[in-house]
Image (cartoon, rainbow, N blue to C red):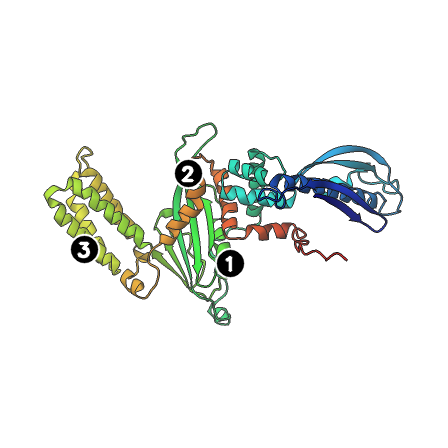
């Protein structure tokens, strides 16, 4: 059995038919049923070439006339124009036309095709490269694209395309403001009934740094957050601490995409670090700020483990005092908890100057924990009461977000070193992809991108 695939062009003035491929099938087996991947690549690549060739010919023929007097324009010459698509790289023959004599101003010649194709990468290929590179390494993205599509690309091309798209997303952000609360109580009362409350968890992670040729430049901090709302899709955001210039704007935009209203309840759960403590302030008049209980109890656990090896016979009393402080913190009594921590710090103060003593480090950690609780005392609620009412007390959600946004792509299996700029730009595209928003951005930039997405074909007569 022979199967012929033809390419038919129907236009206003002419109709043409060209052969694309001829497939042969003999005995039916699992391997010969339908099209193979290689056959699909060859067919789609050939269709793409012929389709683009006819489109370019039709475009040039309709744009070879002067827009003022209608005179046909002379061709000065041709120059090659390389355009990369989903189905291969196409080398176009772009004509350069002389400007009509009736137009005295402007250049003497122009290229209509170069004016239309300002970018040398098709939007669909740019979208796929950006989306896949945000989910896996640049090398794996190249291998996957070349495996399923009839094209040839390079890791550097994918990298620069992702940076260009991310920079474009960053340029769309409006200016940073210290306060995003607008209106007054009377205006907020007139708003429609708000949706379910929003819970936002904020946390930080660390990424291996690279500075120039120095591949061992330590670490830098990345802040990530996740917004949860019952009945709605989660939203994420992230940025590099020392690189981002609009952190509050970025968080506010995420909440706006979640549908935040000024009369809506919202809870921010943070780890109490310096980089995130002030971030959610002045974003909503009905916001509540809670110190993450996980980070509190984690520090207490570390203190117990340190004391077990250095306190000796006094470990039992030390552990009991820590448990009492933990109980007071769980019930929101920061005054009593700080009093116990201050007493423990005072007992260990004698070893603060002797760096050789094994209790010196424990003394320092107890003092740091005291300062941590003291600085975040206004964000410590009655955790017990919140827990029994089904309200969030821990940012375990944010811990999973750190793993989802940072670890899976930038650390763990991906043993890579990052510049702050490279990591920051990747985070913007990755969060957009995880939020299912990257396609919407491309549709906004290229309105006709999905215009012909309906693949239903009319039945043959």
Q: Is residue 122 above or below residue 387?
A: above
Residue 323 position within the rendered picture, expressed as x and y whole percent measured from the top left: 19, 53
Residue under label 1: 256
Which badge, 2 or 3, is on the more N-terminal residue?
Answer: 3
Whether the residues at callouts 2 and 3 have beta carbons within 8 Å, the answer is no
Q: Name the disc covering residue 413, or none.
A: 2
Q: Is residue 139 above or below residue 59?
A: above
What residue does disc 3 label?
324
Decide: is 350 above or below 254. Answer: above
Q: Residue at x 70, y 55 (%)?
A: 457
Using residue 125 as the reference point, say whether residue 281 is left or right of it.
left
Residue neighbourhood size for the residue with mark 1, other residues' Cα within 10 Å, grouped as few (<14), some (14–19), many (≥20): few
Residue 427 lies left or right of residue 93; in this view the side is left
Given the current orientation, which residue lies at the most extreme left position?
313
- Marks 2 and 1, the one that precedes in the sequence: 1
Q: Quadrant of the C terminus?
A: bottom right
**Can residue 369 be seen in the rendering of this structure?**
yes
Q: CA distance from mark 2 to mark 3?
A: 41 Å
Number of other residues with Cα within 10 Å of mark 2, as a class: few under 14, some 14 to 19, many 20 or more: few
Q: Kindly report the distance in space between the C-alpha atoms of the residues bearing marks 1 and 3.
A: 42 Å
Residue 327: horizontal and vertical position, in percent?
A: 21, 57
Mark 1 element type: helix
Residue under the point 54% across and 52% down = 437
Asked whether the viewer can see residue 85, the reply is no
Q: Which label lies toward us, 2 or 1?
A: 2
Element type at marker 3? helix
Q: CA distance from mark 2 to mark 1?
A: 34 Å
Picture coordinates of residue 36 (x, y %)? 61, 42
Secondary structure of residue under mark 2: loop
């Amino acid at each position: 059995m022979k199967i012929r695939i033809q390419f038919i062009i129907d236009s206003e003035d002419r109709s043409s038919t060209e052969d694309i491929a001829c497939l042969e099938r003999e005995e039916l087996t699992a391997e010969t049923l339908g099209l193979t991947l290689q056959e699909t690549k060859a067919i789609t690549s050939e269709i793409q070439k012929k389709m683009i060739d006819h489109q370019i010919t039709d475009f040039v023929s309709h744009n070879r006339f002067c827009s003022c007097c209608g005179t046909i324009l002379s061709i000065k010459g041709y120059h090659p124009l390389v355009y990369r698509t989903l189905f291969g790289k196409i080398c176009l023959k772009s004509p350069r036309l002389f400007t009509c004599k009736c137009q005295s101003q402007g250049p003497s010649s122009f290229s209509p095709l170069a004016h239309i194709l300002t970018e040398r990468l098709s939007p669909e290929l740019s979208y796929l490269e950006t989306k896949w590179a945000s989910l896996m390494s640049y090398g794996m993205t190249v291998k996957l694209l070349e495996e399923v599509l009839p094209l040839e690309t390079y890791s550097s091309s994918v990298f620069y395309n992702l940076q260009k798209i991310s920079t474009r997303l960053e340029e769309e952000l409006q200016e940073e403001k210290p306060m995003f609360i607008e209106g007054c109580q009377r205006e907020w009362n007139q708003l429609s009934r708000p949706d379910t409350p929003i819970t936002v968890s904020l946390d930080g992670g660390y990424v291996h740094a690279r500075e120039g040729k120095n591949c061992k430049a330590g670490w830098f901090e990345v802040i990530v957050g996740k917004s949860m709302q019952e009945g709605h899709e989660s939203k994420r955001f992230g940025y590099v601490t020392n690189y981002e210039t609009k952190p509050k704007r970025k968080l506010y935009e995420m909440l706006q995409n979640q549908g935040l209203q000024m009369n809506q309840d919202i809870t921010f759960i943070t780890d109490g670090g310096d980089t995130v403590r002030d971030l959610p302030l002045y974003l909503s008049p009905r916001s509540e700020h809670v110190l993450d209980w996980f980070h509190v109890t984690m520090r207490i656990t570390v203190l117990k483990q340190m004391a077990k090896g250095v306190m000796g016979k006094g470990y039992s009393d030390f552990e009991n005092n820590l448990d009492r402080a933990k109980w007071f913190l769980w019930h929101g009594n920061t005054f009593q908890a700080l009093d116990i921590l201050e007493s423990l710090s005072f007992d260990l103060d004698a070893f603060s100057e002797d760096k050789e003593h094994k209790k010196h480090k424990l003394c320092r950690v107890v003092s740091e924990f005291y300062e941590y609780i003291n600085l975040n005392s206004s964000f410590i609620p009655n955790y017990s009461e919140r827990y029994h009412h089904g309200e969030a007390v821990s940012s375990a959600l944010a811990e999973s977000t750190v793993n989802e946004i940072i670890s899976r792509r930038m650390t763990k299996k991906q043993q890579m070193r990052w510049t702050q700029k490279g990591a920051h730009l990747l985070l913007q595209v990755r969060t957009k992809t995880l939020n299912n928003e990257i396609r919407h951005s491309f549709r906004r930039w290229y309105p006709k991108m999905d215009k012909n997405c309906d693949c239903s074909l009319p039945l043959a007569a």
